[in-house]
Amino acid sequence: MTALLAAGAEIRYDLTLFVSGASELSARAVASAKLLCDNHLSGRYQLAVVDVHGDPSAVLRSLVLATPTLVRNRPLPVRKLVGDLSDAGRVLLALELPSANAAATARD
């Protein structure tokens, strides 16, 4: 079991955050997503930020209907969370991301 958890620590995460313009809500979403990734996926993630006004074709390809939306593209299956990203526990659970605590436990 520990070997499986340790192997899971090597998984790379590809995330996309869709925001709407340079609003305060967008800035908070970007800050929350970066903090979450740095704290829980350190060195194992790529985070792209897409402004829906600047790249409407990306919105159509991703089927995003509202902002902010954080999408876990990889590993599959794709997971999406719409709305406030400030509750890290909720975001980790919804996107099925590992917590830093689980990774520390796997190493022990």
Image: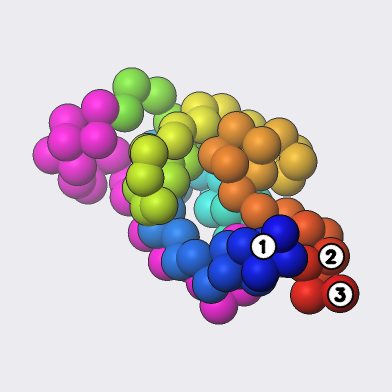
- Check disc 3 and report its element: helix, strand or loop: loop
Q: How far is disc 3 from disc 2 in space, using C-alphas?
A: 5 Å
Marking on residue 94: none
The kind of residue tagged 2 is Thr
Q: Residue at x 86, y 74 (%)?
A: 108
Is label 1 in contact with label 2 (beta carbons under 8 Å)?
yes
The kind of residue tagged 3 is Asp
Determine if residue 56 is in view.
no
What residue does disc 3 label?
108
Determine if residue 12 is in view.
yes
Provide the residue span drawn in magenta. Answer: 37-63
Marking on residue 5: 1
Q: Residues within 10 Å of mark 2 (few under 14, many from 20)?
A: few
Residue 47 belongs to magenta span: yes
Q: State whether residue 36 is above or below residue 46.
A: above
Residue occupying the far top of the picture: 65
- Check disc 2 and report its element: helix, strand or loop: helix
Q: Residue at x 49, y 65 (%)?
A: 11
Answer with mark 1 or mark 2, whichever residue precedes in sequence: 1
The spot of residue 25 in percent (x, y) is 57, 38
Q: Which of 13 and 62 lies nearest the eye of the viewer?
A: 13
Q: Residues within 10 Å of mark 1 (few under 14, many from 20)?
A: some
What residue does disc 2 label?
105
Identify the image quadrant of the N terminus: bottom right
Residue 20 belongs to magenta span: no
Q: State whether residue 33 is above or below residue 100.
A: above
The spot of residue 24 in percent (x, y) is 58, 43
Q: Residue at x 37, y 52 (%)?
A: 74
- Check disc 1 and report its element: helix, strand or loop: helix
The spot of residue 63 in percent (x, y) is 25, 27
The image quadrant of residue 21 is: top left
The kind of residue tagged 1 is Leu
